[in-house]
Image: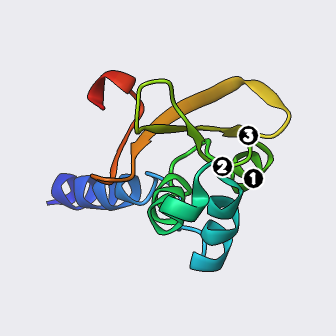
């Protein structure tokens, strides 16, 4: 019985470790407004930014300093860099299709 209880406690603890709470709608909209083509896709960008804000290593300040989303040479796709300020070691690039709302770390998924 103790083992089952221990497993349940560990599982609930690990479920909460996937990231942090999403940023506010207002904060996400401010970053989205910095994005290239924000006049076309601001709401979609804001939603993707909120989603990314829950990812470990995607600091809001970094997304702001990077200027939000930028149009990719892949076509109608956009990319954003996530990371932590003052650290070049853990920068990740995320790709986003505002038409389908698909957000992926892999450009091939687009």
Give the image location of residue 91, x and y in percent. Answer: 65, 28
Rounded to the nearest angstrom, the CA distance separating label 1 from label 3 is: 11 Å
Give the image location of residue 28, x and y in percent. Answer: 61, 67
In screen coordinates, is 40 left or right of 70?
left
- Residue at numbered disc 2: 68
User: For mark 2, does the 10 Å Cα neighbourhood hold few (<14), some (14 to 19), or many (20 or more) residues?
Assistant: many
Q: Are marks 2 and 1 in contact (CB under 8 Å)?
A: yes
Q: Secondary structure at mark 2?
A: loop
Q: Which mark is residue 64?
A: 1
- Residue at numbered disc 3: 84
Name the front one of labels 3 and 2. Answer: 2
Name the front one of labels 1 and 3. Answer: 1
Rounded to the nearest angstrom, the CA distance separating label 3 from label 2 is: 14 Å
Give the image location of residue 51, x and y in percent. Answer: 46, 58
For the point 21% across and 58% down, which residue is it?
2
Give the image location of residue 96, x and y in percent. Answer: 42, 43
For the point 68% across and 60% down, which residue is it?
31
Of callouts 1 and 3, the N-terminal one: 1
For the point 67% across and 63% down, which residue is it?
33
Tally of marks = 3
């Amino acid at each position: 019985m103790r083992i089952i209880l221990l497993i349940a406690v560990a599982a609930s603890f690990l479920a909460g470790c996937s990231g942090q709470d999403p940023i506010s709608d207002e904060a996400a909209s401010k970053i989205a407004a910095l994005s290239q083509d924000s006049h076309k896709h601001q709401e979609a960008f804001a939603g993707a930014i909120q989603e990314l804000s829950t990812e470990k290593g995607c600091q809001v300040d970094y997304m702001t300093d990077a200027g939000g989303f930028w149009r990719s040479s892949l076509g109608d796709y956009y990319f954003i860099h996530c990371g932590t300020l003052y650290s070049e070691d853990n920068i990740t690039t995320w790709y986003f299709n505002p038409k389908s709302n698909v957000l992926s770390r892999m450009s091939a998924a687009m």
